[in-house]
Image: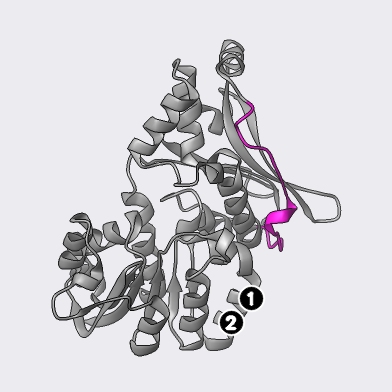
């Protein structure tokens, strides 16, 4: 049995659910893979807890469901204990970084935590887009320098393995076009408006469903989709994209009349992220609301579905779609990446 020592930073929707997934999957992980996942440290915005012998995954999840902090963990928690300080005092094999994106604040504390963990020789698994958008090349160079893995499949399109598909399964190909609907909430909003809800009603419903960011502009103005496109371009196209390279238009200019007119022609609007290969081998990147025909794989997406389409030279056109009614698939990407680090591919 191999014991994997884990520090988990960020205990929001994804971090808390990851704890619940580990509790549920522990017998399978031990029997099928010979892995025991030991939580040696955890931090949220109010404090942290640490125990080299292991915190109880179920107790951490219980505290968060109750609206408490991991700092309230009996005998192990400490209010005000910051994530970076926790990392400095914890011996671990891997950092799971699931703190908020915080691009406006320089992707902190996630970016500094990832840098620190890499220099300490920890593998990184993260669904946090912010550090990858701002410092993709730097972080990968740092991981290579220290001989560790940096995995981030959960940063794009929820639980859909969009990055893995492009990186692994399309090896050897030239990707002529990448199309993605990586942001779930915009599709949900457009479909609700098509059913007759007002903007205000739709936004209220999206917040109640837990699919809208606290800063709604992040979703509605296309920033989230653009950030995910930047990561996809770097990871699957080998194109060193930055956020400012993306031509971006959000969904705010659309109204119900636009949506109904598209439906009458057999089209459905989705916030489409695209990368188009140019003759010189570079890519143009864009995000914009686009009416898609029913025969297009992404034109059939439901209200809580996201997807990606790769058009290649030797593998044809490959598409993948996920139905994600709750955040569990997104949280489970951390388990998928962990297994990629610690389990042989042939297992």
Closer to the camera, 223 or 20?
A: 223
Closer to the camera, 179 or 317?
A: 179
Q: Contact, CB < 8 Å: mark 1 with mark 2?
A: yes
Residue 138: which disc?
1
Closer to the camera, 145 or 59?
A: 59
At horizontal 46% and vertical 82% (from top left) the residue drawn is 117
Quarter of the image for residue 254 reads top right
Quarter that holds the N terminus: bottom left
Q: Position of residue 224 (x, y in %)?
A: 56, 48
Quarter that holds the C terminus: bottom left
Task: Look at the image and give the residue range highlighted in magenta.
Answer: 237-253
> What is the distance, in whole Å, between disc 1 and disc 2 at their CAs?
6 Å
At horizontal 48% and vertical 48% (from top left) the residue drawn is 157
Residue 142: which disc?
2
Tell whether position 167 is magenta. Answer: no
Closer to the camera, 82 or 296?
A: 82
Quarter of the image for residue 53 reads bottom left
Which element type, helix, strand or loop, lies under badge 1?
Answer: helix
Q: Position of residue 332 (x, y in %)?
A: 34, 57
Note whether 141 is above or below 283 in the view shown: below
């Amino acid at each position: 049995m191999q014991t994997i020592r884990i520090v988990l930073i960020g205990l929001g929707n994804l971090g808390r659910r990851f704890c619940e997934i580990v509790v549920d999957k522990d017998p399978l992980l031990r029997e099928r893979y010979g892995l025991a996942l030991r939580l040696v440290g955890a931090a949220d915005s109010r404090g942290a807890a640490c125990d080299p012998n292991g915190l109880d995954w179920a107790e951490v999840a219980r505290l968060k469901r109750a609206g408490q902090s991991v700092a309230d963990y009996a005998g192990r928690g400490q209010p005000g204990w910051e994530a970076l300080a926790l990392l400095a005092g914890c011996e671990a094999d891997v950092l799971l970084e699931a703190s908020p994106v915080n691009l406006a604040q320089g992707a902190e504390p996630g970016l500094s935590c990832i840098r620190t963990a890499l220099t300490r020789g920890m593998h990184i698994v993260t669904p946090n887009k912010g550090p990858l958008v701002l410092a993709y090349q730097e972080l990968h160079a740092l991981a290579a320098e220290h001989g560790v893995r940096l995995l981030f499949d959960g940063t794009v399109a929820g639980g859909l393995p969009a990055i893995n598909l492009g990186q692994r399964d399309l090896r050897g190909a030239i990707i002529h076009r990448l199309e993605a609907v990586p942001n779930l909430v915009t599709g949900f909003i457009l479909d609700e408006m098509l059913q007759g809800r007002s903007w205000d009603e739709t936004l209220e419903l999206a917040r109640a469903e837990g699919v809208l960011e606290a800063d709604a502009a992040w979703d509605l103005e296309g920033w989230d989709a653009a950030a995910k496109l930047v990561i996809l371009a770097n990871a699957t196209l080998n194109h060193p994209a930055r956020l400012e390279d993306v031509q971006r238009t959000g969904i705010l200019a659309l109204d119900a009349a636009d949506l109904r007119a598209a439906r009458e022609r057999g089209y459905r609007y989705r916030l489409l992220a695209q990368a188009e290969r140019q003759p010189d081998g570079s890519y143009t990147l864009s995000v914009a609301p686009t009416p898609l025909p029913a025969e297009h794989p992404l034109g059939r997406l439901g209200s809580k579905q996201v997807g990606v389409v790769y058009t290649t030279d030797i593998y044809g056109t490959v598409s993948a779609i996920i139905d994600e009614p709750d955040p569990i698939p997104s949280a489970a990407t951390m388990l998928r990446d962990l297994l990629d680090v610690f389990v042989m591919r042939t297992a």
